[in-house]
Structures are given as C-alpha cells and as structure tokens.
Image (tube, rainbow, N blue to C red):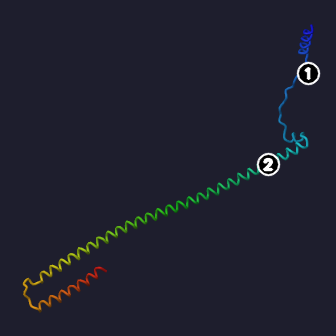
C-alpha cells in the first residue's frame, strides 16, 4: 500500500505542475557599454585596462607592420640598385674582355706580319749574298797568273764591297 500511495503521488505531481512552464531564453549579446555598466567596479576597471592594452597592442602591431613595410621597400630599392651596378660591371667586364681579345688577335696578326717581313728580309739577304758570291766568281781571273797591280785593285774593291755591305746591313737591321 505504501508503494501505491507513492506511485499515486508521483503521478498526481506529474499531471499538475507546480512550476511555471520554462520560457525560452533569448540570447542577445549585450553591448560593451551595457556590460560595463552592469559589471562591478573592479571588473569595469579591468575591462578598461584590457581595452587599453588591446589598443596599445594593436598600435604596436600596426607600427611594426609599417616599419617592416618601409624596411622591405628600402631593401628592394637597395637590391635593385645593386643589381643595376652589377649589370653595369658585368657589361663593362664583357666589353673589356672583347677589347682584350681583339687586341690579342691584332697582336697575333702583327706578330705574324713581322715574322713574314723578317723572312722576306732573310731571303733578300740570302739572294744578295748569292749575287755577290756570283759576282766574285765572275770577276775572279781563272788563270793563276796576274800582276800585282791587278791584285791590289781586287783587294781595294773587296774592301769597298765589305764596307758598303756592312753599312747596308746596319741600315737594314735598324
């Protein structure tokens, strides 16, 4: 019987609600000013301090971003200047290399021209020597008999030839 009375009491309570029905809560976010007005003084002070710190942090970040941007712009302009200088140096070096190569080629051409001229001079001297030897053979008497007067003339003419040949050699060497 006790169990039945408990069951009857619970069913009667369920049917009759002593509590008013639950209302649905509207979740509205109150404004910052409303929260500040409702907050206790220490919380208000803390929120003001937090807001001030957030503003200071924002200003610090904005300042750092501006400084970083300025640094990057200076770095880019400096890099562009260095690249332009480097390009100028490279082009000057290439131009000098071309000039040196041209000078080297010209120098080789001059050296070969000088060598050619020297070979012509050597051949001319050889031909001249052969001609003077031939002339000596032609003018030399074939018979072993000749007089002293002729011998003196031949010696004088040979001395004159040597002198003239030596002078010409000196002129050709210079």
> Where does residue 37 sit, x and y in percent of width and height?
90, 41
In which quadrant is the C terminus drawn? bottom left
How many C-alpha atoms fall within 10 Å of the one at disc 2: few (<14), some, or many (≥20)? few
Question: Mark 2 falls on what kind of element?
Answer: helix
Q: Quadrant of residue 125?
A: bottom left
In which quadrant is the N terminus drawn? top right
Q: Are marks 2 and 1 in contact (CB under 8 Å)?
A: no
- Residue 11 disc label: none
Considering every residue shown, the one lying at the far front of the view is: 144
Q: Is residue 67 left or right of residue 132?
A: right
Question: Mark 1 falls on what kind of element?
Answer: loop
> Where does residue 59 sit, x and y in percent of width and height?
76, 51
> Where does residue 92 sit, x and y in percent of width and height?
49, 64
- Residue 19 disc label: 1
Q: Residue at x 25, y 74 (%)?
A: 122
How many C-alpha atoms fall within 10 Å of the one at disc 1: few (<14), some, or many (≥20)? few
Real-space Cα separation, disc 2 to disc 1, in angstroms: 48 Å
Q: Residue at x 87, y 39 (%)?
A: 35
Q: Is residue 170 left or right of residue 64?
A: left
Q: Is residue 79 left or right of residue 45?
A: left
In terms of sequence position, does the residue under pointer 2 or pointer 1 come before the other?
Answer: 1
Query: 37 and 158: which one is in front?
Result: 158
> Where does residue 9 sit, x and y in percent of width and height?
92, 13
Considering every residue shown, the one lying at the far top of the view is: 1
**What residue would you read off at disc 2?**
55
Q: Quadrant of residue 43?
A: top right
Q: Quadrant of residue 29?
A: top right
Q: Is residue 119 above or below residue 81?
A: below
């Amino acid at each position: 019987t006790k169990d039945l009375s408990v069951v009857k009491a619970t069913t009667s309570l369920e049917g009759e609600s002593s509590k008013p029905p639950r209302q649905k809560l509207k979740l509205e976010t109150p404004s910052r000013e409303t929260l500040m007005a409702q907050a206790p003084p220490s919380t208000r002070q803390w929120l003001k301090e937090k807001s001030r710190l957030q503003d200071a942090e924002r200003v610090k970040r904005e300042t750092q971003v501006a400084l970083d941007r300025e640094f990057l712009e200076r770095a880019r302009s400096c890099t562009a200047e260095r690249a332009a200088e480097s390009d100028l140096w490279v082009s000057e070096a290439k131009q000098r290399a071309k000039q040196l190569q041209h000078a080297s080629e010209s120098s080789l051409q001059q050296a070969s021209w000088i060598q050619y001229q020297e070979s012509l001079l050597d051949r001319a001297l050889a031909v001249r020597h052969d001609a003077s030897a031939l002339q000596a053979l032609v003018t030399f008497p074939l018979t072993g008999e000749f007089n002293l007067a002729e011998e003196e003339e031949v010696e004088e003419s040979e001395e004159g030839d040597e002198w003239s040949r030596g002078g010409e050699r000196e002129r050709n060497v210079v």
